[in-house]
Amino acid sequence: MNIHEYQAKQIFQEYGVPTPKGIVADTVEEAVEAAKKLGGPIWVVKAQIHAGGRGLGGGVKLAKSLDEVKQYADEILGMTLVTHQTGPEGKLVQKVYIEDGADIQDEFYLGVVLDRAKEMPVIMASTEGGMEIEKVAEETPEKIVKVTVDPSIGFQPFHGRELVFGLGLTDKTEQKNMINFAKKLYQVYMDKDAEMIEINPLIKTSQGEFIALDGKMGFDDSALFRHPEIEAMRDISEEDPDEREASKYGLSYVALDGEIGCMVNGAGLAMGTMDTINYMGGTPANFLDVGGTASAETVAKGFEIILKNPNVKAIFVNIFGGIVRCDRIANGILEATKQVDVNVPVVVRLDGTNAPEAAEILKNANIDNIIAADDLADGAKKAVAAAKGEVA
Ligand code: GDP
Ligand code: MN
């Protein structure tokens, strides 16, 4: 789960991680009120969407008067902001964050992410603030300092020294401020079960203080039950409606841009299924994992979600029955044909627990557009043929 910049900064403030003062606003009037409260004389009007690159897309504006705050809030609220992270369709801006303008002397990058290979959090920092970190990593990787922190000992003074020496900070006060900043940020990361925190830019003021000018946080969904305060920050309007609908039924759904809808169980089988479809000359339209607790109802729901996509020309159901029984899936398919208009061919490969019963159920139902497959390769081949309108 991701949150907005203004929410990330609220969390930073609770931990004493310095940020500019700011107030979030839903309307132009609120934005002007917020600016008055902050006092000025310079403000920044920032679009709140779950994507970076807002500055380049026109979603971050520096205002030098209340009139300008009003003008920019008016422009930004309701705009469809397109950045390199939103995709070409962009994202509708529903909130702006009004902030005090900052005294920027230098821009840095600071982030905390999980290093999967080391199985530990890693603090990443760079003097190349304000630039895309992916670009820095590609072009000048030597400018990124990485400090791995073993969670069993936590953030220690030597981690701090590695960080500031790596960044080439020589001033004692600046070193102390940066170490303090990173230490608190590490604590936020651990306490909140974050998956990633990114501050770009982290600025240094002319006083040698460090302030988070931007803030991005993502959380581990599996740990959200421990953090109702984070769950409360969820903004469902930022999430894909089909993916959300699917998650309500315990299904994981990821939309792709091909033409064969895939219903599978387990992420590994999903990958294998998609690869095999590609190998046979087709393209997957989605990835829908019914998981281990599929019922006739959830399978029917899965069909409904897959069929919402008009590009879907065929559906490939590829289930290996272990925990989930094949007869339940077969009943789910029948249920689906009653509840929704399944107007495309459905290739079904069910193997494992109760597979013969499942085959019997489907055969007896005698539905025209259900095509039985023997194995994964056969199923993928038939699904690709069916999507092309060829007789399978
Ligand atoms: P992003 O483009 O989505 O990453 O949004 P940021 O919060 O990083 O803002 C984009 C850019 O706006 C930053 O890199 C800064 O250069 C600039 N910016 C943001 N806040 C201020 C501010 O208070 N003063 C000035 N002068 N520039 C700012
Ligand atoms: Mn940024």
Image: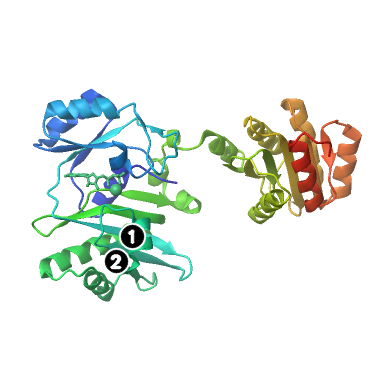
Callout 2–callout 1 Cβ contact below 8 Å: yes
Nearest to the observer: residue 58 or residue 356: 58
The chosen color scheme is: rainbow
Q: Find residue 55 and report its image quarter.
A: top left
Element type where label 1 sits in the image: helix
Q: Which mark is residue 143?
A: 2
Residue 33 shows up from this direction: no
Q: Tell me which amino acid carries mark 1.
A: Val
Q: Tell me which amino acid carries mark 2.
A: Lys
Q: Which mark is residue 351?
A: none
- Marks 2 and 1, how far apart at CA: 7 Å
To which residue does mark 1 refer? 136
**Residue at (31% x, 32% y) in the render:** 95
**Residue at (34% x, 26% y) in the render:** 78
The image quadrant where one finds the C terminus is: top right
Residue 91 shows up from this direction: yes
In percent of width and height, residue 378 lies at 82, 49
State left or right for residue 143 relative to residue 174: right
Q: Is residue 340 above or below residue 299?
A: above
